[in-house]
Image: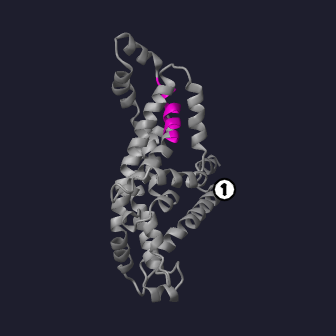
């Protein structure tokens, strides 16, 4: 009798646990089915796609041509995206860290007002700034100075739009840092800049991982700002070029699905590389 109770308590024959696992497995299947459908579509010829179900494996009509076509079409746009995303991500995180340091560890008049402005900026949707953004860059016309000027405009836009959220994230983290450690450094004659470089910055690596992953994902996947600011196809980022893969007369769904997977690959790589630091930052 005790043995049966032990088996039930450990979940060996517990029907509720079996039902729970069954529901979880079913939910995983439902969640992954669009990815599976997209993957099978990207490996089929156009004829096979028309004649089979999207969930049916590409047993006949298997091809990697959609992947090769999508890779060639998106190659230059991927380069443009990296040229824009990397500085936008790093600079917005750095400026957000500096702003948060000034808002938490330095006493000065007007902090509450500036913090309120940062909080308000976080909740401004992209759609609300599209018209004034286009008007601003029509006045401050960097695109006329260089062939890649439009990319510079888009980069600066994402830096400015990313600083508020990075500041709020860093501020919540810096409030948990030990003030006594910094006070001891001040008594030893360390300046505010030196305290930041030697104490705050090394302790900020987990939160930098969080903000870098968040910003990289947001900026890489942006479509609206790119659509408004980029007119020259030579400056297209990957989201715009992926949208352009839809033909005017006919759509090759295999190429579109392959392009979607290729466009998503960098964000997956970033999560893999910074995943451990991201987990640490989330638990702080």
Is-magenta flag for residue 175?
Answer: yes
- Residue sitting at 56 percent across and 30 percent down? 114
84 inside magenta stretch: no
Most foreground residue, 135 or 113: 135
Residue name at image x 63 percent, y 46 percent? 2
- Residue 18, compared with residue 105, is above or below; it is below
Instruction: Look at the image and tell me whether residue 260 can be seen.
Output: no
Q: Nearer the viewer, residue 216 or 222?
A: 222
Q: Nearer the viewer, residue 225 or 212?
A: 225
Residue furthest toward the front?
Answer: 139
Q: Quadrant of residue 62?
A: bottom left
Q: Is residue 160 above or below residue 41?
A: above
Q: Residue at position x 44%, y 49% from top?
A: 140
Residue 219 relative to residue 194: left or right:
right
Callout 1 secondary element: helix
Q: Is residue 93 visible?
A: yes
| Colouring | one colour
Q: Is residue 47 above or below residue 251?
A: below
Looking at the magenta stretch, what is its main secondary structure?
Answer: helix
Residue identified by numbered label 1:
16
- Residue at the top extreme, as displayed: 187
Tell me how many marks there are.
1
The x, y position of residue 75, in whole percent, is: 33, 67
Q: Is residue 232 left or right of residue 122?
A: left
Q: Which residues are magenta?
A: 164-177
């Amino acid at each position: 009798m005790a043995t049966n109770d032990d088996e039930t308590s450990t979940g060996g024959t517990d029907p509720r646990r079996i039902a729970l696992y069954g529901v979880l497995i079913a939910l995983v299947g439902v969640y992954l089915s669009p990815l599976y459908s997209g993957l099978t579509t990207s490996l089929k010829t156009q004829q096979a796609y028309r004649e089979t179900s999207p969930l049916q494996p590409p047993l006949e009509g298997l091809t990697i041509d959609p992947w090769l076509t999508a890779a060639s079409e998106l190659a230059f746009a991927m380069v443009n995206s990296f040229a824009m995303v990397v500085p936008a991500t790093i600079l917005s995180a750095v400026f957000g860290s500096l702003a948060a340091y000034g808002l938490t560890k330095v006493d000065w008049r007007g902090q509450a007002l500036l913090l309120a402005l940062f909080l308000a900026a976080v909740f401004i949707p992209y759609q609300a700034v599209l018209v004034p953004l286009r008007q601003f860059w029509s006045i401050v016309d960097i695109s006329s100075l260089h062939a890649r000027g439009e990319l510079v405009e888009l980069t600066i836009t994402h830096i400015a739009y990313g600083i508020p959220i990075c500041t709020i994230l860093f501020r919540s983290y810096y409030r948990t840092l030990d003030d006594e450690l910094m006070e001891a450094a001040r008594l030893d004659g360390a300046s505010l800049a030196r305290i930041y470089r030697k104490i705050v910055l090394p302790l900020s690596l987990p939160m930098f991982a969080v903000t870098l992953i968040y910003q990289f994902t947001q900026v890489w996947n942006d479509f609206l700002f790119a659509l408004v600011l980029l007119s020259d196809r030579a400056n297209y980022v990957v989201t715009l070029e992926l949208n352009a893969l839809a033909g005017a007369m006919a759509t090759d769904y295999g190429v579109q699905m392959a392009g979607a997977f290729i466009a998503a690959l960098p964000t997956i790589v970033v999560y893999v590389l910074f995943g451990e630091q991201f987990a640490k930052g989330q638990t702080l």
